[in-house]
Amino acid sequence: MTWLVWRQHRAAFWTVIGVTVLYVAWIAFQRGQMMEFLDGYGFPARSLDDVEREFQPYADAFGSVTTGLTAIPVILGVLLGAPLLAGDLENGTAKLIAAQSVSRNRWLATKLALTGLVVVAATVALSVAFAWWWNPIKVHYADIDWTTSDYFNTTGPAPVALTLLSVFGGVAIGVILRRTLVAMVVTLGFTVALQTVWGHFAMSLGNIVTATSKPVSPGTVITFPEVPRTAYVADTSYVTGSGKLLDVSTCADAPIEQGIEACMKKADIVGARLDYIPISQMGSMQWFGASILFALTAGVVAFLFIWGRKRLV
């Protein structure tokens, strides 16, 4: 059965493996170029802030790679997941398999297991390689925003979980629709929607850390508290003497004759507050989010086996 499934989908599997090897090789090359520059510059003893323009080509290389990495869940969901069973149902192969001595559950389990193995191996390799490339400058280069999908979705368990759910979700869509082309189109919408929802809620997985400035007299110039340079700032606000929070746009439109200082004194603003998430929480946030995605994937797999008992022919 394993041989049959591999033989049936070997073109797709070998394509995934080949592209993964090429991507990892390219990442290794880019990292070598970057480390050669950093070693010659004297990093980390010398700050990258002093050589921002010279380092920009190496920073731009990240963007060219992450564009492809973030598209992997969509590509594999559409081209690998959707046709996996839809093609068998559409061309009658499923009926031929069902007429043999092998049970439907074994056939389905082999299909999903082998596909999942290829997907996990590829995404883990890419995740590890990209993290290996990025880690040397991760906490030293603030111009790279770790909260974006280019970095949050391409390291740790996040790409593995997103891709598995995209692929198995595509399989489920193909089983229901039973038409390959239609399943691929619907899976495209599903994977794009999944990435959008994931991106919207990703930052809510972290624990907010609050930094408050030292209180001053109302009307005095406010100095905002310092936070780690790579931190994600969730909210910025003024603090009044009574502890009430005001938006930082308060007094921004104060009349010239009144003056900003007079406006802030009238509003009883005595300090400022920043809510932020440090980059040190990135790993725990990814694992928390990935556990949710893995649970959803398990639900999709359970659905496939339940559906497959009666309708997978």
Image (cartoon, rainbow, N blue to C red):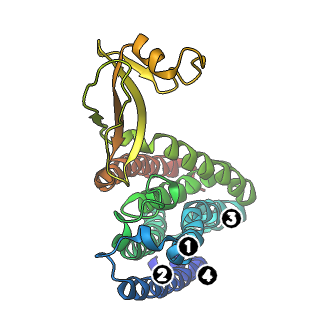
Query: Which residue occupies 32% across, 51% down?
Result: 228
Residues packed near mark 4 inside 10 Å, few (<14), some (14 to 19) or many (20 plus): few
- Upstream in the sequence, badge 4 or badge 1? 4
Identity of the amino acid at label 2? Ile
Identity of the amino acid at label 1? Val
Q: Dot 4 corresponds to which residue?
A: 11
Distance from disc 3 to disc 4, alpha carbons, whole Å, reads: 20 Å
Looking at the picture, tell me which residue is in the foreground, 18 or 127: 127
> Are the two marked residues, 2 and 1, in contact with CB atoms closer than 8 angstroms?
yes
Give the quadrant of residue 272.
top left
Q: Nearer the viewer, mark 3 or mark 4?
A: 4
Q: Position of residue 309 (x, y in %)?
A: 48, 50
Quadrant that contains the C terminus: bottom right
- Upstream in the sequence, badge 2 or badge 4? 4
What SS does tag 4 mark? helix
Identity of the amino acid at label 4? Ala
- Upstream in the sequence, badge 3 or badge 4? 4
Q: Position of residue 91 (x, y in %)?
A: 71, 65
Q: Is residue 134 above or below residue 242?
A: below
Q: Nearer the viewer, mark 1 or mark 3?
A: 1
What SS does tag 1 mark? helix
Identity of the amino acid at label 3? Gly
Q: Dot 2 corresponds to which residue?
A: 27
